[in-house]
Amino acid sequence: MEHKISEKKRYQLSRIILENTKKKRISSGNYYSVLIVRVGNCSFCNETPAKKHKTSSIHADTVVGSAVPPDDDAVQPENPMGQPVVWHCGPNDLILIKPKETIQIQSRNSQHAAELLWIQYSEELLAELSEEGTDLLKSMEVVPFSCISVPTDGGTAAILKNLFTRLERSEQEKDDFGARLFEKNMRSLMIVIILRACIRSEFEKTRKGHRQFVLDDLFAYIHRHISEELTLERLEKVFFVSRYHICREFKKQTGQTLHSYITKNRLRMCKKYIIEGMPITEVYKMAGFGGYNHFFRAFKKEYGMTPKEYYKSHMTL
């Protein structure tokens, strides 16, 4: 079954029921379409043929659809077999479809139907709802998708569902005081909330990705310079991040302090050098310890024996 909106209408609301995992086609026509997953789980893929879509911020991964920040040169992905990527959606997720795109969608549960709330905006309506400093049409064009799935929190989804229901009743309430203004404001609020959800999703993914990237770089830097003096001041200058943020994030993500991590790695190097027969008086220098006393105390605390005792115990094996 294929759904299309009347070209004469500037926006339209409808509900879609997906049952028995039967596939349905949804075509956006000349409209920006947003589907809100009210209940159930579904999956979809972009059916629009023979076209690669340039993106810059949000796209699917190469196996399962999810909103993640790609490289600048990313394109609408395909799986290794050359087929469109399948996106998986659950309750409260949004599905955004740009004009002239078609998706194929189905319920992921043969026992329970999925229900979607479908709203479509024309370019004319988006332009009309815009105001100075808030160009909704341009914002929808900038959002880098042909079709994507965007997660929302329960509160945001509840507001969108409520707005959808109120807009459905607008025809029955057309004679109420301020009906046209009320309806216009609800349409504006809905699209603004949807765009905010896209921005928030992108920001969260970018923030998490950046934080992981910094930590991975920190690990690599420590191992490259483990034999040198690694002060917080030095790391602060290298990564352009405050020493307090470095320490806090490191402890939060690894469960140990940065000082402890560096010390343990230096002690492992010392063990290796001791086993290789290098003089203990030289070992601590090669591993980056600032002095013998510091090295001696740290070694004994970590391994329960002195460096010399460790050497002897290894030699007797």
Image (spheres, rainbow, N blue to C red):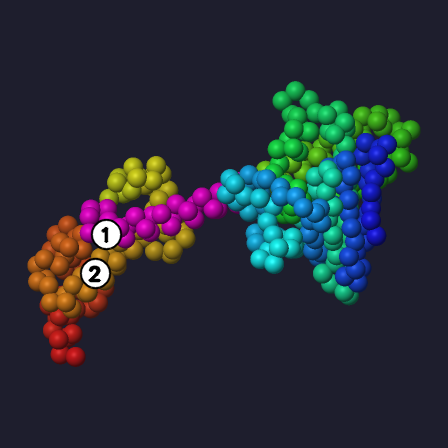
Where does residue 243 sit, x and y in percent of width and height? 32, 41
Determine if the magenta segment contains residue 168. Answer: no
Q: Is residue 181 visible?
A: yes
Q: Are marks 1 and 2 in contact (CB under 8 Å)?
A: yes
Rendered residue at 77%/27% (across/down): 124
As drawn, the label of residue 119 is none
State which quadrant residue 310 falls in. bottom left
**Circle 2 crowding by C-alpha within 10 Å: few under 14, some 14–19, many from 20:** some
Q: Is residue 200 visible?
A: no
Where does residue 140 sit, x and y in percent of width and height? 66, 33
In the shown orientation, is residue 65 left or right of residue 130?
left
**Foreground pick, 238 / 196:** 238
Looking at the rendering, the stretch of residues picked out in magenta corresponds to: 203-230
Rendered residue at 74%/46% (across/down): 102
Determine if the magenta segment contains residue 223. Answer: yes
Where does residue 178 sit, x and y in percent of width and height? 84, 25
- Residue at the bottom extreme? 317
Residue position for label 1: 226
Helix, strand or loop for disc 2: helix
Q: Main secondary structure of the magenta part?
A: helix
Helix, strand or loop for disc 1: loop
Which residue type does callout 1 highlight? Answer: Ile
Q: CA distance from mark 1 to mark 2?
A: 9 Å
Q: Is residue 317 above or below residue 36?
A: below
- Residue at the front extreme? 50
Which residue type does callout 2 highlight? Answer: Met
Where does residue 34 sit, x and y in percent of width and height? 73, 42
Q: Is residue 176 above or below residue 256?
A: above
Residue position for label 2: 269
The mark tally for this picture is 2
Rendered residue at 73%/37% (across/down): 99
Q: Quadrant of the C terminus?
A: bottom left
